[in-house]
Amino acid sequence: MINIPTREQLQQLPRLYETENIPPEDKVVHLHFQVDQCHWWVMEYDGKDTFFGFVLLHGWSQYAEFGYFTLSELLEIKVSGCIEIVNDPFWIPRAAKDVGLMQNTLQLQSIQQDR
């Protein structure tokens, strides 16, 4: 992984379930990991290895979802054996509803569910 989150960054994240009473669109996205068209947005952390957030893989918005993933898994991913995930060094924490790609994906899923 390029730009591995620091211990200080991880300690500042809300713990798992700490934000469960906040609507998903209002939860703050604290970290963003990306490689190619795959995105992992982090909202909570267990303090050890597990994140809760939103995942969009290969740009397939119909399969994007909220869920759990681990830092150790992200550290192991290498595309074509050499391209690593990047922890976005310019990411500014913001509400999920203010993350363009995430908002577009959630809107598309909502439209598809209404059909």
Image: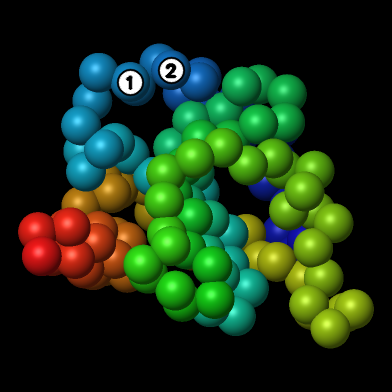
Residue at 42% x, 59% y: name it. 64
Q: Amino acid at mark 2?
A: Tyr
Percent x, y of residue 35: 63, 73
Percent x, y of residue 3: 71, 59
Q: Which mark is drawn over residue 17?
A: 2
Q: Is residue 68 left or right of residue 27?
A: right
Q: CA distance from mark 2 to mark 1?
A: 5 Å
Q: What is the number of callouts on the image?
A: 2
Q: Which mark is drawn over residue 73?
A: none
Q: Is residue 19 above or below residue 114?
A: above
Q: What quarter of the picture does the N terminus occupy?
A: bottom right
Looking at the image, the residue that sits furthest to the right is: 81
- Disc 2 vs disc 1: Cβ atoms closer than 8 Å? yes
Residue at 84% x, 83% y: name it. 80
Residue at 82% x, 70% y: name it. 78
Question: From this viewpoint, is residue 32 visible?
Answer: no
Q: Is residue 98 above or below residue 12?
A: below
Q: Is residue 61 left or right of residue 47?
A: left
Q: Amino acid at mark 1?
A: Glu
Q: In the structure shown, which secondary structural element does the residue marked by tag 2 occupy?
A: loop
Question: From this viewpoint, is residue 72 visible?
Answer: yes
Residue at 33% x, 39% y: name it. 28
Q: Nearer the viewer, residue 104 or 2?
A: 104
Q: Is residue 77 left or right of residue 26?
A: right
Q: What quarter of the picture does the C terminus occupy?
A: bottom left
Residue tagged 1: 20
Q: Nearer the viewer, residue 58 or 99?
A: 58
Q: In the structure shown, which secondary structural element does the residue marked by tag 1 occupy?
A: loop
**Image-quadrant location for residue 30:** top left
Percent x, y of residue 8: 64, 31
